[in-house]
Image (cartoon, rainbow, N blue to C red):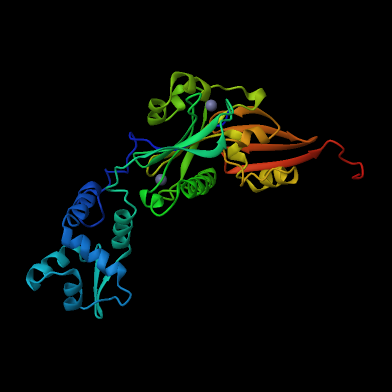
Amino acid sequence: MSRNRVGENPEKSIDEGAPKEGSGLSFSETVATAIASLASETRLRILLVLWDAQDRPLRFGELRKRVGVADPGQFRYHLRKLEDQFVRNTAEGYDITNAGVNVVWAVRSGDLTWSGDVDPFPIDSVCPACSAGLSLRYEEQMFFVICPDCGRTHEMAPFHPSGLVGRTNREIHAAFERVSHGQFELGAHDICPRCYGTGSFTLVTDENAVPTDLREELSAAELADLTRYDLQEGIASVVWTCSQCGLWMEFPLAVLLCHRTAVAEFYRDHGVDVDAVPARDLPNHLGDVAITVTELDPLSMLVTMTKDDETLTVSIDGGFAGVATERTPADYGSPAS
Ligand SMILES: [Zn+2]
Ligand SMILES: [Zn+2]
């Protein structure tokens, strides 16, 4: 059975120990000061007005008028709080910095404020375990692909609340599949979809390799399923965890490999478009998969994937950076019929 999940590990955090160069402030003090300088409705409005202004930079008076503050002294006080970090005072007027744009995006995505849930709705996809129709549930800014019949959670991934706006349930589902495919694609290439950081891959051999928040989300049966490990049957899950922000994702090993060009090509030649099949269904399309682990740390293994009498051998050395492949047709050497 396929399980594909993206989550955030609450035990992980950014490095709070390192002081910011030259400021005399620790990293967390610098962040706290930046956040405190945003704690005003007027200052947030300044950023939103600047970002929306096609004609920025804006002169002091023009910006003040558009933000709607009558008292110039008061307005100057608020602008000063934003200057350097979020707003730039140039010879032509005031402009927004990229850090300021990030604040606007955080506000407009709903990430900071949204608390609404979406009731589960059926999607055009069946449970790989029991063949019942699946549903999509949105809770705490995460989507869950759930089976109402057998109770399994097949997929979970964060999704910005702004992605719900103006879309029908059908369109929300299509967007979710596309986004989650993109997130797995980046993670499979050791790029965090949240912060672009690098991370590490761990083969799940027991419960301890499962991220804490995922462990809490799963039933005992699902956890047993996830930690089931049968290399001959090609059953092995890999967790990738971002070293910078703690975002993690979990995928069956074979699904992870499908994000490699040579593997995707192999399956495409055998009629499986790995980009079009939801990751949770993918293991059912991959034929026979067998795994031999030659070393656990760093992870080295040999994976053979057989589809329609052709075998692809994938060797993984020292994690997933070095993946080499070799194709062996059953009728290798004889002319194609
Ligand atoms: Zn089911
Ligand atoms: Zn990250």
Position of 162 relative to 257 (above/below): below
Residue closer to the observer: 28 or 226: 226
Residue 74: image location, x then y, percent: 8, 67
Res 58 quadrant in image:
bottom left
Left or right: 220 in relation to 270: left
Residue 239 appears in view: no
Left or right: 37 in relation to 137: left
Residue 92: image location, x then y, percent: 26, 80
Residue 34 appears in view: yes
- Residue at image position (22%, 48%) is 26
Left or right: 165 in relation to 186: left
- Residue at image position (70%, 47%) is 265
Residue 164: image location, x then y, percent: 40, 49
Which image quadrant shows ligand 2?
Answer: top left
- Residue at image position (61%, 22%) is 230
- Residue at image position (31%, 69%) is 52
Q: Residue furthest bottom?
A: 92
How many numbered tags mark residues here?
0
> Quadrant of the image for the C terminus?
top right
> Quadrant of the image for the N terminus?
top right
Position of 105 relative to 12 (above/below): below
